Image (cartoon, coloured by chain):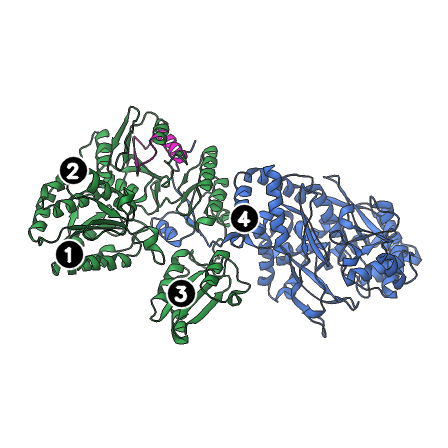
Chain colours: A green, B blue
């Protein structure tokens, strides 16, 4: 018989990351059938009732109480699970709070009382409440990086229209990356100052662009996130227009690199003139058909070619991103058994997964056949993939992050998938993107490279790794790359080259890694 | 057009990892210890987004004016008169009572007793049984004091001959009224209808009222909040404790009191000597004068009426005549006289919560050792009470300052947006009356205002602004 156990902790708010960690710790206990750690919001309590828990157990509970609930095979298991959840949750509490004995501010207003000259708010509360916090920040005269997901379209448009009236920025919702005034906000890489501003409707796209600009010597003035929907017809590029207008007058910026998955062509056309006289390179992954742009705008179809075009606009010569790659790919092919024919992309960055799909299916027509994905370019190639097909997975999508942290923060879930692919005799190549910078895991190579080494040593598939980062990133760019090289991986210079290398390996044609993008 | 920031100074609301990343870069960051707003009520969250968002600056502007009026009005006691002579619309067989409008059938026991005592004192009935019949038969009109620019404490009901303080705000031009406090013991405002309670009402009418009229006409207008401010710095919260302000007032009036005719002087001296809450109704009338000026501002989210009749609890926002009413809350965290307990307690009652709207009472708790002793024994408990008001108020008083908080001003201007957002309602320290036996006060405790009427007021403000 199943045991149901519920505990309510009054006035105990923990954020979603900690809730997930607690949930995971409880579910990891043998004999646990179902478990959750969540705030006692009306919606969450409804879920508990649906799961068969007795509402009496949380009578009087309110949204800022923490509730832990377990279905388990026995009292002992339930107790063990509860203890595991509690330990995980309460050990991680207090992180991020300011040092000293002073109570941390409880509201934006409290924070502004202490630091009245604040100019940016980073908002990452649950989506239902994010617009409220963003509105308060705008009212207080702050620019906003809105990391939160699940903000409604209506709320997004209202926020952005208001921000435009007020002359403020609302970067997001769902914007994880920005760099303003030299400060990395959210997930971002440490770049040297330079003349290029990145405007991005795609998080890891922005990180790839800023990292390449830094590594190839151009430097970055600002990175402005837009949120994935900004360039859609529904939102109409309100934020993109504000960003371009601000950059048009920004003395530090000479060239603008716009990065997006396929946007609405009409919207892009309408917002581009806001950049004024400054050259714009529009890296619109997969280049939507029918795209016409005004003079002074250069189009690119990949992140790599967008950055190269940006350097050209500055009169600089990029290093060759394919240098030396042909030989490494050829070496890898030489040792690969004939029956290994499949690509497995295991991506932590959504935009990097998307770019990979674009490269594998649009830039190399006829080489590979369809590539299946949880985020397919063509809905005919969604999951589940038929046996014997190539797949690229965006492991940052909701279906993979339910109940556990994002793979950029915690590699554990990706390691499990990597091991699985490592033992599949049909897999020729696994593609891994490894994102460095603020927000990302402290030492992703420390977790991933040993597994890669093991797979390689056991004669498994070739592992192609792209390390997205800069020399100044806290994880140490060279050391991270070296760890994967030492583990026997093919390490590439750009994310695009990783996909091209993978294509080259499955096609047994090293020259494909040199493809011009 | 936006100007991109040169040097980032960040407020982080949500995941601590983003604050950690900023600190690692040496960037100034304040991390907010965030809580789910409005108890997760998504309708209220949407309303708050509009009232902090599109309508935010209009509401903030109105609130600034409300705050200015609450903070800068100068209510003066200009006259001691009777209700029928001074209070607009007061005449005939009418009683002014605490709280929102109510039918006699719904009136709680302590207030019923107070009404009966007033009816007898007015001479409309010879005893409380007859008074009960008149009241039950609808022969006495019942009017909320708040509808007549007046406020009355606890379970007060006052008739036309009751003496009242007449207060005029020099800055705002408003006039307000409150009865002369009945003092301790067997008294109608504590829900008693004994002969002694009736006798106290007659004493007020026949002795105290005329004596105070004489004192004031000789002493001249009194700046009430000047004394109140001194009282706050001497440990009064001016709601639960008015000891210091009462003493200052007696000292101020001592020459005029000494000049009273023989038949008034001794009685007044004994009355004042035994009444440490004498200043309470003066402070209430002054607060009402301020809120009457403030409520003329439209489009504000600040509460300018908050009152209870023992059956219902009601609030109003500045700029709207609309009451938002829910059931009167129980009084919790209570200390009972021996032999009494929660089962004996009547719900929260009285108009005195007007004080909490102008920076007195709960907002001033942190300066009052007497209130601290009651709230849990340490000054930290009192500071928490003030802090709770600070979180829901738009500003601070420039005249009421708290020595233990380094002379910071008391919180002023309860903002319904903050109340709903944070789920923190005003807490009012108050006396507890017996719910049925007529023994009067049986303890004291803390009444927590019910959230529902604030949520309703928030929605009504939103509707008014959208219209």
| Residue B24: percent from left, percent from top | 34, 51
Dot 1 or dot 3, earlier in sequence: 3
Q: Are marks 1 and 3 on the same chain?
A: yes
Q: Nearer the viewer, residue A253 or A224?
A: A224
**Residue at (20%, 32%) from the top-left corner?**
A316
Q: Which residue is mark 4?
A: B43
Disc 2 versus disc 1: nearer the observer: 1
In the displayed structure image, the side of residue A62 where residue B123 appears, left or right: right
Residue contact at pointers 2 and 3, CB within 8 angstroms:
no
**Residue B320 found in image quarter:** top right
Name the residue tied to disc 3: A35
Name the residue beneath numbered marker 2.
A319
Examine the structure image and report whether residue A264 is included in the region drawn in magenta.
yes
- Helix, strand or loop under label 3: strand
Q: Disc 2 sits on a residue from what chain?
A: A
Which residue position is annotated with label 1? A487
Q: Indicate the position of residue B148 as horizontal and vertical percent values.
A: 78, 46
Residue lying at the far left in this picture: please name it: A334
Q: How far apart are the alpha carbons under marks 2 and 3?
A: 52 Å
Q: Nearer the viewer, mark 4 or mark 2?
A: 4
């Amino acid at each position: 018989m199943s045991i149901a156990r519920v505990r309510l902790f009054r006035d105990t708010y923990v954020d979603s990351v900690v809730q997930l960690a607690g949930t995971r710790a409880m579910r990891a206990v043998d004999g646990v059938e179902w478990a959750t750690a969540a705030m006692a919001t009306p919606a969450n309590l409804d879920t508990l009732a649906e799961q068969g828990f007795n509402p009496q157990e949380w009578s009087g509970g309110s949204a800022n109480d923490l509730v832990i609930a377990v279905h388990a095979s026995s009292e002992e298991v339930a107790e063990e699970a509860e203890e595991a959840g509690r330990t995980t949750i309460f050990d991680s509490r207090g992180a991020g709070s300011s040092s000293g004995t002073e109570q941390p501010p409880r509201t934006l207003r409290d924070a502004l009382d202490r630091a009245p000259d604040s100019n940016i708010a980073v908002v990452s509360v649950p989506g239902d409440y994010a617009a409220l916090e963003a509105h308060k920040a705008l009212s207080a005269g702050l620019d906003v990086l809105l990391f939160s997901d699940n903000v409604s379209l209506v709320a997004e448009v209202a926020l952005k229209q208001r921000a435009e009236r007020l002359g403020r920025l609302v970067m997001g919702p769902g914007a994880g990356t920005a760099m303003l005034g030299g400060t990395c906000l959210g997930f971002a890489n440490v770049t040297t100052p330079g003349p290029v501003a990145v405007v991005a409707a795609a998080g890891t796209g922005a990180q790839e662009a800023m990292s390449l600009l830094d590594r190839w010597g151009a430097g970055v003035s600002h990175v402005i996130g837009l949120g994935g929907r900004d360039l859609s017809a529904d939102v109409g590029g309100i934020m993109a227009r504000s960003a371009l207008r601000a950059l048009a007058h920004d003395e530090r910026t000479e060239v603008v690199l716009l990065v997006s998955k396929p946007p609405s062509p009409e919207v892009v056309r309408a917002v581009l003139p806001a950049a004024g006289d400054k050259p714009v390179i529009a890296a619109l992954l997969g280049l939507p058909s029918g795209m016409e742009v005004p003079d002074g705008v250069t189009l690119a179809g990949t992140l790599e070619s967008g950055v190269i075009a940006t350097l050209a606009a500055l009169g600089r010569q990029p290093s060759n991103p394919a240098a030396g790659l042909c030989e490494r790919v050829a070496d890898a092919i030489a040792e690969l058994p004939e029956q290994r024919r499949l690509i497995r992309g295991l991506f932590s960055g959504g935009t990097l997964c998307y770019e990979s799909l674009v490269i594998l299916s649009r830039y190399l027509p006829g080489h590979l056949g369809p590539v299946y994905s949880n985020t397919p370019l063509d809905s005919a190639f969604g999951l589940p993939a038929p046996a014997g097909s190539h797949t690229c997975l965006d492991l940052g999508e909701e279906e993979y992050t339910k109940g556990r942290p994002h793979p950029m923060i915690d590699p554990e879930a990706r390691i499990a998938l990597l091991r699985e692919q490592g033992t599949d005799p049909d897999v020729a190549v696994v593609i891994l993107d490894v994102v460095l910078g603020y927000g990302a895991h402290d030492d992703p190579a420390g977790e991933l490279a040993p597994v890669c080494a093991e797979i390689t040593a056991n004669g498994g598939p070739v592992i192609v790794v792209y390390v997205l980062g800069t020399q100044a990133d806290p994880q140490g760019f060279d050391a991270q790359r070296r760890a994967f090289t030492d583990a026997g991986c093919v390490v590439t210079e750009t994310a695009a080259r990783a996909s091209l290398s993978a294509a080259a390996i499955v096609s047994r044609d090293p020259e494909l890694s040199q493809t011009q993008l | 057009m936006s100007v991109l920031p040169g040097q980032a100074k960040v407020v982080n609301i949500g995941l601590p990892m983003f604050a950690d990343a900023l600190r690692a870069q040496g960037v100034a960051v304040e991390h907010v210890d965030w809580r789910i707003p409005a108890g997760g009520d998504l309708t209220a969250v949407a309303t708050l987004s509009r009232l902090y968002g599109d309508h935010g600056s209009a509401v903030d502007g109105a609130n600034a004016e409300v705050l200015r009026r609450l903070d800068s009005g100068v209510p003066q006691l200009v006259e001691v008169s009777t209700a029928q002579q001074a209070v607009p619309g007061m005449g005939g067989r009418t009683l002014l009572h605490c709280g929102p409008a109510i039918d006699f059938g719904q009136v709680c026991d302590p207030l019923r007793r107070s009404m009966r005592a007033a009816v007898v004192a007015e001479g409309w009935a010879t005893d409380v049984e007859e008074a009960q019949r008149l009241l039950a038969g609808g022969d006495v009109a019942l009017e909320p004091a708040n509808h007549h620019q007046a406020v009355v404490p606890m379970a007060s009901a006052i008739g036309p001959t009751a003496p009242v303080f007449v207060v005029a705000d020099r800055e705002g031009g408003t006039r307000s009224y409150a009865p002369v406090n009945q003092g301790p013991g067997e008294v109608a405002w504590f829900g008693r209808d004994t002969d002694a309670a009736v006798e106290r009402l007659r004493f007020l009418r026949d002795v105290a009222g005329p004596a105070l009229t004489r004192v004031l006409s000789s002493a001249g207008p009194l700046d009430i909040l000047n004394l109140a401010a001194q009282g706050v710095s001497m440990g009064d919260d001016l709601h639960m404790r008015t000891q210091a302000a009462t003493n200052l007032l007696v000292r101020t009036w001592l020459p005029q009191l000494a000049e009273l005719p023989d038949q008034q002087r001794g009685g007044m001296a004994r009355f004042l000597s035994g009444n440490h809450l004498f200043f309470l109704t003066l402070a209430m009338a002054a607060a009402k004068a301020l809120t009457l000026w403030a409520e003329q501002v439209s489009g504000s989210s600040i509460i300018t009426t908050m009152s209870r009749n023992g059956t219902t609890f009601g609030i109003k926002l500045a700029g709207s005549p609309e009451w938002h009413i829910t059931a009167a809350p129980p009084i919790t965290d209570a200390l009972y006289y021996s032999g009494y307990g929660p089962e004996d307690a009547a719900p929260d009652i009285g108009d005195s919560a007007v004080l909490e709207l102008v920076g007195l009472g709960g907002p001033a708790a942190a300066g009052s050792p007497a209130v601290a002793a009651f709230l849990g024994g340490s000054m930290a408990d009192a500071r928490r009470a003030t802090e709770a008001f600070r979180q829901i108020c738009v500003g601070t008083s420039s005249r009421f300052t708290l020595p233990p908080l380094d002379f910071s001003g008391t919180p002023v201007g309860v903002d319904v947006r903050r109340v709903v957002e944070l789920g923190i309602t005003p807490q009012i320290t108050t006396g507890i009356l017996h719910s049925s036996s007529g023994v009067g006060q049986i303890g004291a405790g803390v009444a927590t205002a019910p959230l529902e009427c604030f949520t309703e007021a928030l929605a009504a403000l939103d509707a008014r602004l959208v219209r």
